[in-house]
Amino acid sequence: MTLSSIIWTVVKILIVVGFIVNLSAILTWMERRQSAMMQDRVGPNRAEITVFGYKIRLFGLLYPIADAVKMFTKEDFIPPNADKVLHSLAPMLSLFPPLVVLGVVPFTDTLCLDNLHEVVQKNGVVASNWHFFSSWIEQPSCSLPGAKNFIDGCCVIGCQTAGVVHQPWAEHFGTCPANVAPGMIGAIHMQVIDFNPGVLYVFALAGMGIVGASIAGWSSDNKFSLMGGLRAASQLVSYEVAMGLSIVGAIMVYGTIRLDEMTRWQGDHVWGVFVQPLAFILFLTAAIAETKRAPFDLPEGESEIVAGYLVEYSGMKFGMFYMGEFIEIATSSALLVAIFLGGYNMPFLHRDGITIAVGDAVVWKQHIPHILVILMQAGAFFGKIFVLCWFQMFVRWTLPRFRYDQLMKLGWRMLLPAALANIFLTGVILIAFDRTGTEFQERMGVVGDFVNLATAIAITFVQLWIVIGFFGSTQPAIRRNAFNKRARSAGEIVEKALAS
Amino acid sequence: MEPTDYDIDETDLELPAEPMRLNMGPSHPAMHGTIRMVLELDGESVEKVDVQLGYLHRGFEKMCERGTWAQVFPYTDRLNYVSPILNNVGYALAVEKLAGIVVPERCQYYRVILGELARISDHLTCNGAMAMELGAFTPFLWIMKGREHIWDLLEEETGARLTHSFFRIGGVAKPPRPELKARVREVVDAVLLILDESEKLLLKNRIFVDRLQGVGHITAAEAVQYGFTGTVLRATGVAYDVRKAHPYLVYDRMEFDVPVGTDGDNWDRFMCRLYEIRQSCRILAQACEQMPDDGPVNVERPEIVLPEKEAVYKTIEGTIQHFKLVMEGALIPAGEVYSYTEAGNGELGFFIVSDGSGTPYRVRVRPPCVFTLQGFPRMIRGHMVADIVPTFGSVNMIGGECDR
Amino acid sequence: MPQPLVGSFPYDKVKGTAVPKPTRTASEQGYVSEITKGIAVTMTHFFKNTRAMVRGERPDPVVDPMSEGITTLEYPDQKRPYPERFRGVHRLTHRDDGSPRCVACLCCSTACPAQCIYIEAGEYGGKDKRHGYERYPVKFVIDELRCIFCGYCVEACPCDAIRMDTGVHPVPYDSRDQFIYGKNMLLAMASQAGKQKHENPRAEPPDADYGPIERLAGHH
Ligand code: SF4
Ligand code: SF4
């Protein structure tokens, strides 16, 4: 442990925690505004501060601040018969685990501090000094049999197939150029904790979330709280199982439980969601259940047991639960991104730049300096988290709540068997895949390239669609006075409605 | 090692457990209209429910005995406060029955139109709130937008969104506006479109369907014995609708169906309400076609109906008639009568007694939801705590009407 | 436990149409596909509304409340005029000379079901042209907090002296005494169109065309 590594760890912690805490604050705003847009409302937009006589509203983005002020200044009420220690401990226990889970999630590729301005390849070799005008750089030819192209420091075939034999530099992936000057740090792994348990650590800590909720339920001395706590405990335990088993298939494919290696595998091949679609859905479901939000918000089910284990909390203690919930959304999205959606990888974005290649055919190639690549990766990672959070909001505001027994049935009778089936299926396919020849595996590599291409096209298309749809087209989105203009008689529409 | 196969009584192995008492309400998010339920729970399932009502008791019936016959209308607004027009109609018909009045045709159609609008808003609220309590907030707010259209229209017609106090003995406070028919068609269109859209989120959603189907079941025989009426009865399969069985106003000229369920569970109640909305729209379409565009709205009974303002201002007879009616109230012949109409929740009955004076001697209300509430413990027994929410929602207890 | 009903129901002369049961097709039972469709529906709303917000194309809730999309009235900033029949807070109408049209006949306070109108009647002085013809309200107080806005007072007034067409809804205040509207307050109110005059065609003693009142029939 050198001083600089400690400093870097602190910096990484600040990046992760800063991002996640701020994201959770933004999510509270997003939840309100987004649900408003879905429900034909305006949403909160009136919080304002006056700066030098100007009233600033920022579309309601100031609400999280107002919330914080409110929570801090509210009375901190502890019921007279409550267990005071546990009652105060519970909010901390539910805020802390989701925060530290992110420690093992890599948010960019390894950062080479000394080579920021150069083009660094995957195997830690500096391809060249990047120069704007001479961006087309001759690549060394590939010496492997059958491989034609040399992308990102390795031969196409070598990269696309999982066999280690073809990859002479495999153990160097994610490393930096060797010429690290004395006193420099060189390679920085962009995850806070760089250790082997990976996913196991995630589950160990996610399991802690139960403790907070159930302690809160028990210590509040309220029957509704108790029921909420019990529901939370049983729900989280059930879905923990399905969640853990659902990614076993992914672990088998990736051959690792380290999240950074999983991410790297997805960069080399395709995103995990395309090889493990079922596992993705199962994990998404279980992750939403873990966040205790609709349709799985039974522990809080406000119309049934008032607010469940939150009934007796007020002020900042309630705020901590609330924050913990939103942090959990962000955390589960981050895990989904790292395991299934390619982590920081974007299609065709390699460590040495953009290379659009399908199979042996290189369509376009552009070297990009290391620092820009790292920034793009960070942008991709955090952007994906944001999109997933956005999606989870849709789920929350579209679906009604399960009932307790239905929830258990879904967990134990549907998700669990499906996860087991997925493991079995994955095993069978993996064995079959290993038995096939190199030729087939090469072909699968090409298929993977096509999938990447499709993903890239889809992402571009959606972005263009949003930009053009929002700012380009002149067609108004809302038909004004739509009902009047339709000018149908009530009788007609009634007949239609009855016929359907 | 001791032998492990000695005899143990099965019951010794179980830990002693006693049911948990849980107080739901009177202020609880799902107990709309302040009602209290004392539950005995075995884990999550409900062993016993004790429904305690009366938290919204205001002495409605006693209050009615204080003023004139006409001054009861504002009180009836506060019975079923989701569809006040229907209560207005019910009370007006009861007094008219006692006084032997049949209001002019135009007024009858007007009452039907406003009443059906109120019924739609009642059912929209009930179904929307039920979905909302199950966590589906989005369709609820869409549906509320539809209800908003109806209330806007009612506000334009009657002058108030909720507390209309619009109908009078022998007529109506103000004649229909000329725009009425066009506006009704417009609103019905809008409501149906909104309904179609909201249904997309609910009817095929398995989570929602599972929460409703097979929950809160009651048989037709039990429902009849409890005295259920309205949608809750029809959901069990009994096609009893006062509008069909004992037509009043001009309902006998309307063509409409009575949607019935088969199992009497939450799903059937939900669907019955959805289909009744459509039937109401059908009635509205027909009523708009048949309603005469001009003609009197009040009966020619000067001893009961206030004279035209013009006559009050200009003629001595009008002024005196006006003073007599305002100061003494209309004198309703002595006698007693029971009159019943189909309100939002079922058969809303008014049993009124007159001693011949300008003040009611007795006004007794038969509120439909008291009877449905009696059956509620029967419906919920054996189900889970979470089932109370949709079942109570679909019973549609309205505190103002139930507790009076 | 109610006993099973003996005999048939009394209501079976009407045939009901049965409502459908849930279809429960395979795709519905599998959650995913139907949930995706549902999310598509909400997403459509989201994109439409967000786009309208971003581009400033929101339908104007004041003039177009029936439109699709967001029609929320942002209340204190935007106001929709109340319909013509809306019953707002009361006003007392004026005569040409600005005095209240009210003749203190107590009809309105009698008709009021909430008993929230208090009137103290006074006689005109001996020289006044209306002396002996009618009275005037010395005090006219309405407790707007007790008032239920039923409109009975307007209906009961025989000379169009009280009206509720101000287009002002019941205003919330901080203390109870602010809800007590006195005579001057009520006289100061105007209708939505800004009118304060009454519309009673009956001629009064000071009017030029004041004459005997019409009768529908003569004495017998
Ligand atoms: S509106 Fe009704 S309650 Fe209010 S003062 Fe007039 S009569 Fe009384
Ligand atoms: S406002 Fe009209 S009803 Fe009331 S006292 Fe004056 S004149 Fe009579």
Image (cartoon, coloured by chain):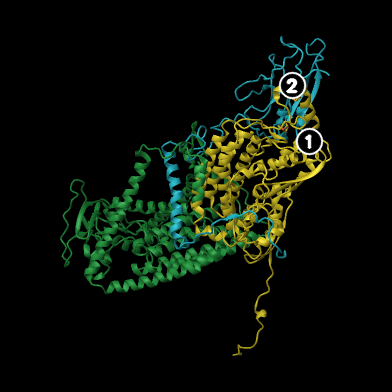
Residue A200 in which image quadrant: bottom left
Kindly identify which residue carries mark 1. B68
Chain seen in cyan: C
Q: Nearer the viewer, mark 2 or mark 1?
A: 1
**Ligand 1 image-quadrant field:** top right
Residue B362 showing in the rendered view: no
Chain seen in yellow: B
Q: Position of residue A373 (x, y in %)?
A: 29, 52
Nearer to us in this view, A464 or B375: B375
- Residue B322 in the figure: left or right of residue B121: right
Kindly identify which residue carries mark 2. C102
Q: Position of residue C168 (x, y in %)?
A: 63, 29
Q: Please give the name of the residue rendered at 70% of the width and 13% of the height, measured from the top-left corner.
A: C97
Quick check: is the Cβ at mark 2 less than 8 Å away from ligand 2? yes
- Label 1 marks which chain's residue? B
Specify whether disc 2 shares its chain with disc 1: no
Residue B101 showing in the rendered view: yes
Give, as a three-letter code, the residue at label 1.
Thr
Nearer to us in this view, B143 or A209: B143
Q: Disc 2 versus disc 1: distance between alpha carbons?
A: 23 Å
Give, as a three-letter code, the residue at label 2.
Cys
- In the displayed structure, C134 sits above or below B64; it is above
Helix, strand or loop status at disc 1: loop
Nearer to us in this view, A318 or B283: B283
Residue A227 in which image quadrant: bottom right
